[in-house]
Image (cartoon, coloured by chain):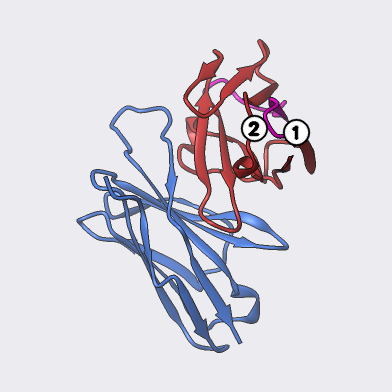
């Protein structure tokens, strides 16, 4: 079974631009979560989508948004890019079985975003 | 906010067992302990998780104390490829898929 895939793997943007990152979950997985990893802040939770709805949200400004499609694929968007948005953006998927009390997340390789 | 405390780094000789400790004193009754590792800024790799009982899989063993306030990840025979940052995470329960990663432990496996 193929793992979580993220595109693009590397991206360079300039301040003020916007960017869209894509995540394809493992087949059959219905939940997609996004994380930001920087040297200073470590791995931080951005948001989680399940059934095309945002179910959980971290403490990030509104410039960070996401969505999930009916096939569970997800995109995240960052508008008005700042230098501090340079980071590795990781996507994770999980089964999200009904009635489950926990869910193992499987991570993709990440998208390395550099803002100049 | 991370709910776990781990040593910043540890060394282990190749072929020996690596025992990585984690404190999670504020864990609630329905939260699980998860372990992941990350190598060279790749995506974190799932290792193992548990609720109360000790768990073992092909990669590692997880020992959780009876009061659930701490746990230990055991890599029985560490190899050079096990050099990575290991994260202990408390997740599941009410927070479901909202994982809080701490700083992790950098494990250095030496020949």
Does the magenta-highlighted stretch encompass residue A34?
no
- Check the residue under mark 2 and report the chain it is in: B
What's the residue at 23%, 43% (across, down)? A28
Q: Position of residue B29 (x, y in %)?
A: 57, 20
State whether residue B66 is above or below residue B30: above
* Chain A visual colour: blue
Instruction: Tell me where residue B54 sits by quadrant.
Output: top right
Task: Tell me the number on the disc at residue B78.
Answer: 2
Q: Position of residue A87 (x, y in %)?
A: 59, 69
Q: Is there one chain holding both mark 2 and mark 1?
A: yes
State whether residue B60 is above or below residue A81: above
**In the displayed structure, does residue A115 sit left or right of residue B65?**
left
State whether residue A54 is above or below residue A17: above
Q: Between marks 2 and 1, how big is the CA–CA gap? A: 7 Å
Between A23 and A66, the one nearer to me in the picture: A23
Residue reaching furthest to the top: B66
User: How many neighbours does mark 2 have within 10 angstroms: few (below 14), some (14-19), or many (20 or more)?
Assistant: many
Does the magenta-highlighted stretch encompass residue B29?
yes
Segment tinted magenta in the rendering: B14-30
Q: Position of residue B67 (x, y in %)?
A: 68, 13
Instruction: Tell me where residue B77 sits by quadrant.
Output: top right
CB within 8 Å, label 2 to label 1: yes
Task: Tell me the number on the disc at residue B13.
Answer: 1
* Chain B visual colour: red
């Amino acid at each position: 079974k193929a793992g979580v895939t993220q595109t693009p793997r590397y991206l360079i943007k300039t301040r003020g631009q916007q960017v869209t990152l894509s995540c394809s979950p493992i087949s059959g997985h219905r939940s997609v979560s996004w994380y930001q990893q920087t040297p200073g802040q470590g791995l931080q939770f951005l948001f989680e989508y399940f059934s095309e709805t945002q179910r959980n949200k971290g403490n990030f400004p509104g410039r960070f948004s996401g969505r999930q499609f009916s096939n569970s694929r997800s995109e995240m968007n960052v508008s008005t890019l700042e230098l501090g948005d340079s980071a590795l953006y990781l996507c994770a998927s999980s089964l999200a079985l009904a009635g489950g009390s926990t869910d193992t997340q499987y991570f993709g390789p990440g998208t390395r975003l550099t803002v100049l | 906010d991370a709910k776990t405390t781990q040593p910043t780094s540890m060394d282990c000789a190749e072929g020996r067992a690596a025992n990585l400790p984690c404190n999670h004193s504020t864990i609630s009754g329905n939260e699980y302990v998860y372990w992941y590792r990350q190598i060279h800024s790749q995506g974190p790799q799932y290792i193992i998780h548990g609720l109360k009982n000790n768990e073992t899989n092909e990669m590692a063993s997880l020992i959780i104390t009876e009061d659930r306030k701490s746990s230990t990840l055991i890599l029985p025979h560490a190899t050079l490829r096990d050099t990575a940052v290991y994260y202990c995470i408390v997740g599941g329960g009410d927070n479901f898929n909202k994982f809080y990663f701490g700083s992790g432990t950098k494990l250095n496996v030496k020949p």
